[in-house]
Amino acid sequence: MKVVFFGSPAIALPALNSLLNAGHEIKLVITQPDKPAGRGRKFTPPPVKVFAENHGLPCLQPEKIRKDEKTLELIKSANPEVNIVVAYGQIIPASIIYLPPYKSLNLHFSLLPKYRGAAPVQWAILKGENLTGVTIFQLNEKMDEGPILTQVETPILPRENAYELEIRLSHLGAKLLIDTLNNLDRLIPKEQEHSQATYAPKLTKEQGKINWQESAELIDRQVRAFFPWPGAFTYLGNQRLEILVGQAIPGLMPSTRPGEIIQIDKSGIYVGCGQNGVYLIEKIKPEGKKEMFAYAYSLGGKIKPGMLFS
C-alpha cells in the first residue's frame, strides 16, 4: 500500500521499519521539528527523521500541521491509500485524517479505551496494571476515541520499567500493524466502550518527586513508571538523587520514620516507607553525576542508617 507515515520518537521506528520490510511504499514521512536537547541544548532531529534520511524517504517537519497548507498539498500529491500514525505528537486535522481511501490508522500503546492520552505506558505501570497491550484504531478528531480494528494484550512484567515496556510494545505493535494492513478489507471496526475510558495525561517533572509516606509498592511503581523521564527523585540534605532501580521488600520492618535509612549493605540502601513498608534503592544518580550502585554511593557519601530522605 501507499503510505504516509506520521511519527517522531524511537518507539515509532519498529512500525516504520516493518512497513518497509513488508513492501509497503512510504510516500512521505511527517515528523516533529528538530528540538534542543542535552546540556548544550543543541538542535536534535527526532529519531524518525534520522531513519527517513538514512533510508532515502522524503520527510517533512511542520511546526503546526493543523495550519500548514503546504504539508496538506504535499500529502495530497503523495496520494496515499492510508495514513499510519505512531506517536506523532501533534493533533492531525480532519483534512488529513480522512484524505486517503482507508483514512488514518493509529497505533496506540494501551488496550483502549483504557489509558487514552500521551503517556499510556507510564500510567499503566503507575496504576499497578498487570496487563497492557497495543491497539490499532481508526483515527478521528477526538483523542484516541476512534473505532478499534485490532488489539493484542501482554502482561506487564514484575520489574519492568516504562522504557523497557515501551520498547516491547513498539515491536508488538509493529507486528500487529502489518497483520492489520494485510486483513484491512476484512476487518470490521468496533466502537469503543466510552464509559470504560481512562486517561493518561502528559507527565510533569514534579510528578517524579517521591513521597516516602506512600507505600513501598506505590514508590516502586513510581520509579518504574517514570524511567527514564521525568525520573523518580528524592533529596538527601540539599542533594537531589534520582532513583533508577529498586524494589519493594516484602514483609514489615520495625516502625521507622518514612524516608529513614534503615540499613545499608551490598544490595543497596533500605528506606522506610508508609505502612511500615521498606523500599530498597539499588541504583541511583546523584545530580550532576553518573549513575551508580546505591551501595557505592553510600560509601562515597558517608551515608549511614538513621539519615533521612526528604
Image (cartoon, grey):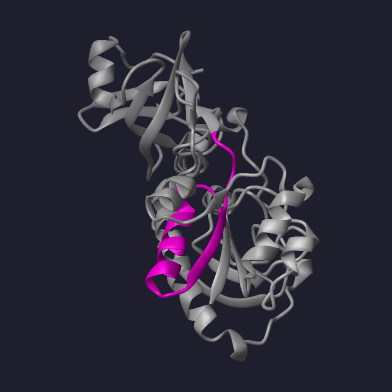
Q: Whole-percent x and y of residue 83?
A: 62, 67
Q: Which region shows up in magenta? A: 7-34
Quarter of the view holding residue 136:
bottom right
Is 19 within the magenta?
yes
Is 187 drawn above or below residue 79 in the view shown?
below
Is 216 drawn above or below residue 125 in the view shown?
above
The residue under the point 45% across, 41% down is 220
Quarter of the view holding residue 94:
bottom right
Residue nearer the viewer, 92 or 292: 92
Q: Whole-percent x and y of residue 161?
A: 42, 47
Report whether 275 appears left or right of 303. right
- Tag count: 0
Residue nearer the viewer, 37 or 283: 37
| Residue situated furthest front in the rendering | 77
**Residue 259: in sight, yes or no?**
yes
Q: Whole-percent x and y of residue 205?
A: 59, 29
The residue under the point 60% across, 91% down is 186
Report whether 244 appears left or right of 144. left
The residue under the point 53% across, 79% down is 180
Is 223 drawn above or below residue 49 in the view shown?
above
